[in-house]
Amino acid sequence: MYDQFYGFTGRPFQLAPDPDFYFESLTHRKALSYLGYGLSQGEGFIVITGEVGAGKSTLAAHMVASIDRARLTVGQIVTSRLDADELVRLACQAFGVMTPEGRPRDKAAALSALELFLQDEARAGRRCLLIVDEAQNLSIHALEELRMLSNFQLGAHPLLQTLLLGQPEFRIVLNEPGLEQLRQRVIATHHLDAMEPDEVGPYVEHRLSHVGWTGRPAFAPGVYARLAQASGCVPRRINQLANRLLLLGEVEQAERFDCDMLDEVIADLAGDTEDGLPQKPESADFIHPEPARPAATPVPAADQAAILAELARELTKRDEQIAELQQAVMELAEMRGGPATTASEPDLEPLLAGIVDLTRRIETLETRTTDQNEAIRHVLTMLIEWLEAENAHVRAA
């Protein structure tokens, strides 16, 4: 493997978060400042968002590795689509909380065991921090359950603080009307942007130096700039490209990497859709960073009306499909509640046919609802971008 060929002590560009490889770019330094401020408050919620691969989990791992564990107890969960009860049980598991009978099997037992644990930690002089990764997957009910956990107190002393890590759409979730009370408890928030282009070279060399790199292989002028362009300066994408580049270097026994070798790697990965990478573009670029939209350019009134009209149409379609499903349920109920007949096979056929038809309708509705959710999310994102642009325009004026 290339680590042996180049004399490395380990893999410098692994994708799993590792605090030993933490690189403090400008955006990470800002995020760490917000984290430090939030932790100093000892209560409420801290929210860090960022694109996939921006380094949110690595940032949290670095923070956990840096704190005094004698003063702060940390539990961490990575969420899928959990309901409120599952979230409570996972929080218990994250802190190693057990009941006298073993693991808490119901919500009431879990809450009681968790509260006792938090009180014991507070009496021992330790605060508790729950880190929730992939928070965009949480339902409104699960987020409300987290808010309720923040109500645990010992006297006037809050017992639990929560750090929420999520992708950009989590900001939309937080703006839901039902989460007003949670929003009031957010004491620090930061969006983790991509690194600056001139930070890509130091980032690569920083990771290499942690595995014993002493200049072999060397990087030709222009390679780091090309890597920044192809990756969009997103750490995980940089890691993917750099890892493939080292693999190619081992195959070709290369001592020096130039732009031609990097372009070969970019072309090789261009058609790879894993981890959200785009299909192969016409050019050799691996990823084209999305150009920033001028903040002072307002959306024309006609476009605003079109966006709102599209949203209204999607909501109307959903209402119609819900009504269709309700009608199917009523039809099936009437079929089952009809005059009593003998339980012969011919008499059961209409009921079975109705069940099959209803099942098909439900499957069709689920598929349509998924598509409409994506459409509605797209429209809402457009509206938020427009509002942010308008606010920036007003501030600039």
Image (spheres, rainbow, N blue to C red):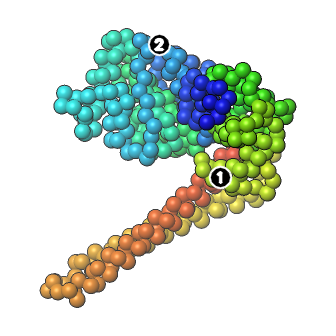
Residue type, mark 1 in image: Asp
Residue 27, by quadrant, is: top right
Label disc, if present, on residue 272 of the rendered structure: 1
Residue located at (42% from left, 23% from top): 74
Label disc, if present, on residue 193 of the rendered structure: none
Task: State whether residue 219 appears in this view.
Answer: yes
Task: State whether residue 187 appears in this view.
Answer: no
Q: Are marks 1 and 2 in contact (CB under 8 Å)?
A: no
What is the spatial separation of the Cα atoms under label 1 and label 2, in whole angstroms? 42 Å
Quadrant in the picture for the N terminus: top right
| Residue that protrudes farthest toward the right in the picture | 221
Front-most of residues 203 and 388: 203
| Residue that protrudes farthest toward the bottom in the picture | 346
Q: Is residue 327 above or below residue 307?
A: below
Residue located at (25% from left, 35% from top): 104
Residue 117 at x, y percent in the picture: 30, 22
Residue 79, by quadrant, is: top left
Q: Secondary structure at mark 1?
A: loop
Residue type, mark 2 in image: Asp
Residue 139 at x, y percent in the picture: 44, 45
Q: Secondary structure at mark 2?
A: loop
Q: Is residue 194 above or below residue 282?
A: above
Judge the density around disc 2: few (<14), some (14-19), many (≥20) Cα neighbours within 10 Å.
Answer: few
Earlier sequence position, callout 1 versus callout 2? 2
Quadrant in the picture for the C terminus: top right
Q: Is residue 109 left or right of residue 360?
A: left
Residue located at (63% from left, 31% from top): 3
- Write down the residue under mark 2: 68
Q: How many marks?
A: 2
Viewer-nearest of discs 1 and 2: 1
Judge the density around disc 1: few (<14), some (14-19), many (≥20) Cα neighbours within 10 Å.
Answer: some
Q: Is residue 271 above or below residue 112?
A: below
